[in-house]
Image (cartoon, rainbow, N blue to C red):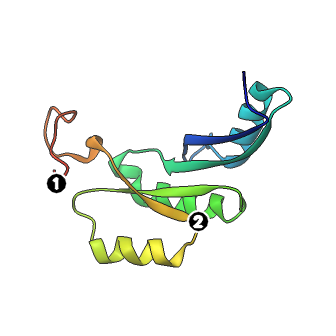
């Protein structure tokens, strides 16, 4: 049922005392795959507004050690589009960006417009 080669299309990294690193991801996911080969993944930082800057930097640091992986920057509505564009151009392993509802400045975030 599991293909010979597996690319994980949705995973998170997070810095901290118990980091969610690419090494721990690789170990955990590979253990689930049996004979299948893990060939990479697509990562975002954990989407917490007060961790955005450190999370994105941790993502960039982790990607630098894993040429088989790609990343999406976590962005918020107050981010400077030019700065986001510059980061995307400067880091070839970044393939896009990911806005999250958790950045909306409102009590109920699930239905927030993208601009919030």
**Left or right of residue 62: residue 9:** left
Task: Choose between 49 and 95: the one closer to the eye.
Answer: 95
SS for dot 1: loop
Q: Which badge, 2 or 1, is on the more N-terminal residue? A: 2
**Circle 2 crowding by C-alpha within 10 Å: few under 14, some 14–19, many from 20:** some
Residue shown at the point (65%, 46%) measured from the top left? 21
Asked which quadrant contains residue 1, the reply is: top right
**Left or right of residue 114: residue 48:** right
Residue shown at the point (28%, 56%) measured from the top left? 76
Q: Is residue 15 visible?
A: no
Task: Choose between 26 and 105: the one closer to the eye.
Answer: 26
Where is residue 97? Give x, y as percent.
40, 58
Question: Can you say whether 21 is above or below 83 in the image?
Answer: above
Q: Is residue 67 visible?
A: yes
Q: CA distance from mark 2 to mark 1?
A: 26 Å
Where is residue 106? Give x, y as percent.
13, 40
Where is residue 7? Give x, y as percent.
66, 43
- How many numbered marks are there? 2
**Left or right of residue 100: residue 77:** left
Task: Choose between 108 and 2: the one closer to the eye.
Answer: 2
SS for dot 2: loop
Give the residue number, with chain letter if any, for mark 2: 93
Give the residue number, with chain letter if any, for mark 1: 115
């Amino acid at each position: 049922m599991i293909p010979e080669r597996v690319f994980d299309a949705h995973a998170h990294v997070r810095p901290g005392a118990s980091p969610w690193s690419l090494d721990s991801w690789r170990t955990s996911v590979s253990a689930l795959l049996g004979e299948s080969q893990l060939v990479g993944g697509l990562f975002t930082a954990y989407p917490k507004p007060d961790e955005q800057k450190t999370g994105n930097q941790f993502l960039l640091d982790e990607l630098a050690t894993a040429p088989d992986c790609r990343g999406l920057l976590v962005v918020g509505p107050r981010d400077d589009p030019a700065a986001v564009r510059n980061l995307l151009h400067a880091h070839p392993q970044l393939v896009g960006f990911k806005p999250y509802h958790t950045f909306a400045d409102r009590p109920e975030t699930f239905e927030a417009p993208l601009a919030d």
